[in-house]
Image (cartoon, rainbow, N blue to C red):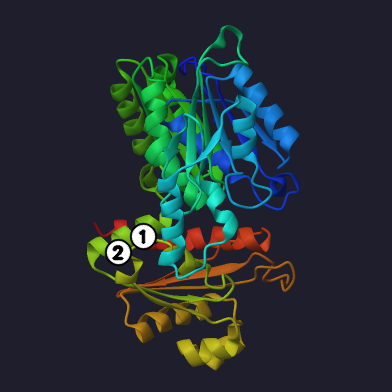
Amino acid sequence: MSISTHFKALNIELINTGSELMLGLVLNTHQQWLCRQLADAGYVVTRQTAIADSGPAIQQTVREALERADLVLVTGGLGPTSDDLTRDLVASLLGRELRTDAGILAKIEAFFAERHRPMPENAGVQAQVPEGALVLPNPHGTAPGLAMEINPNPFRPGGKTAWLIMLPGPPRELRPMFNDHVLPLVRQKFPLDEAFVCRTLRTTGLGESYIEEKIARKLAPLVEAGLELGYCAHYGEADVRVIARGPSAQKMAAEAEAIIREQLGQYIFGTQDERLNEVIIRLLTERKETLALAESCTGGHVANQLTNVPGSSAVFLGGLVTYSNEAKQTLLGVSAETLAQHGAVSEPVAREMASGTRSRLGADYGIAITGIAGPSGGTEAKPVGTVFIALATPRHVFVLNPINRYDRETFKEITCRQALELLRRNLIGRK
C-alpha cells in the first residue's frame, strides 16, 4: 500500500529487541502490527530497527533514535530474565534512577497468587521504574509498560522534547496495552493537524490486479482530489484501503467506499480488521443457525479458525477430522462403494461427508473438505492441490473443486477461506 507524505510532520521510530528475532526463531509481528495501528490512526513510522538483546546495541540504537525522533517505541526486554535488559539500559542511558514501585510489585505478587504459582525471586525486578516514567498497566502479564518524556532531550539539537515508550514483548500483552494506553497518549501529545479517515474493505476470491481494474478508473477523480488508494493481498484475500484527510475527509471516504461496494459487491466480506471467521459466526448467530464440519486434508484448521471467535459455541456444534477412509465410513456414513468407485478425494465423497456431518450432529449446515495437500500423493487425474469442498444445507449440497497448488500450510489457509466463503455466500444470499 502506498503511504502519502501528507501525514503530520512527526518522526516516529520503532525498535524491536530480541536475539530470537535476529536468529530467525521468531517472526517479528510487532513491526507489522504497530505500524498498521499507527497508520490507521494517521501516523506513520519513519524508521524501524530490529536488534539483539545486547547492551551496547540497545543503548546505541535508542540513543540514535532519540537524536532524530519525536516518538520512539521499544518492544521487548522488560521481563525478569537475564536477557531482559531494556529497562535498565535505557535508565542508565538517560541517567535516571530505577526505583521499586510498591503498587506494581503488589500486582506481580497477586498475579502469581491468583494462579497458585510460586513467585520467582527475580520477578520483582519488573517493578523497577525509571525516575519520572509513566507506568502503563499490564493486566495480561507481569511487566508493565513505561512511557518517558525526554525533556530536554540531551541527544537532539536544541534539546527538543521526545517521548520514549517501552512495551513488553509478548503480543498478548503488548497489543491491548498499545490500544488502551499508548495510542491515547500519542493522540494527546501529538494531535493531528487535520481530519483523518482510513477505511479498509476486505474481499476474498479476487486478486489485487483484478480489483484495481474494477475500481481504479472510477475512483480516479477522488484520487486526483487527494484520496489515497492502496491494496494488500494475503492468503486468498485482498484488502482495499482508502485514506482521506482534511475538512471533506468523511465525505470523500464515504464516496470512495460506495464506488468500491458497487463494483465489488458480494466479494466484500468485511471492513477494517474484521476476519472471515468472525463474519461467519456473526451471520450464523443472527440467524440462530448451526454448523458442523468434516475435515480431512485441512486437519481441523477450519474448526480452529471458528473456535478462535468468542461466542462460537452457540452456533458451531462440532467438527470431525476424518483423515482415513475408515473414519469417513464409521463417523460420517460415507459408503464403501462411493470410496471404492470415486476415491476419497472426489465430489461424491465430499457430498456424503457434508451430509453425514450435518445429519449426525444435527446442524443446519455441514461443511466437508477432502483433498491432496502434497507435496506427494497426487496423480495425473488428481494432482497435488486438488480439493473438494462441499456445503450441505437443508435444501441442497453445493461443491467447489479448486486446485490449490501451495505448500501444505498455505493450502490449509486458502482452503479454509474457500470453505467459509462458500458458506458466507449462501447465508447472505438468503437475506
Residue toward you, 269 or 95: 95
Kind of residue sitting beneath label 1: Ile
From the top left corner, tell me how far across and down residue 425 is, in percent: 37, 57
Residue toward you, 108 or 382: 108
Asked which quadrant contains residue 121, the reply is: bottom right
Residue in view at x 49 percent, y 58 percent: 417
Q: Quadrant of the C terminus?
A: bottom left
Residue underneath mark 2: 284
Side (left or right) of 280 relative to 89: left
Residue underneath mark 1: 280
Kind of residue sitting beneath label 2: Leu
Asked which quadrant contains residue 337, the reply is: bottom right
Side (left or right) of 429 relative to 391: left
Asked which quadrant contains residue 362, the reply is: bottom left
Side (left or right) of 326 relative to 380: left
From the top left corner, tell me how far across and down residue 303 is, in percent: 46, 69
Label 2: how many residues lie within 10 Å, few (<14), some (14-19) or many (20+)? Answer: many
Q: Are marks 1 and 2 in contact (CB under 8 Å)?
A: yes
Label 1: how many residues lie within 10 Å, few (<14), some (14-19) or many (20+)? Answer: many
Q: Quadrant of the N terminus?
A: top right
How far is disc 1 from disc 2 in space, using C-alphas? 6 Å
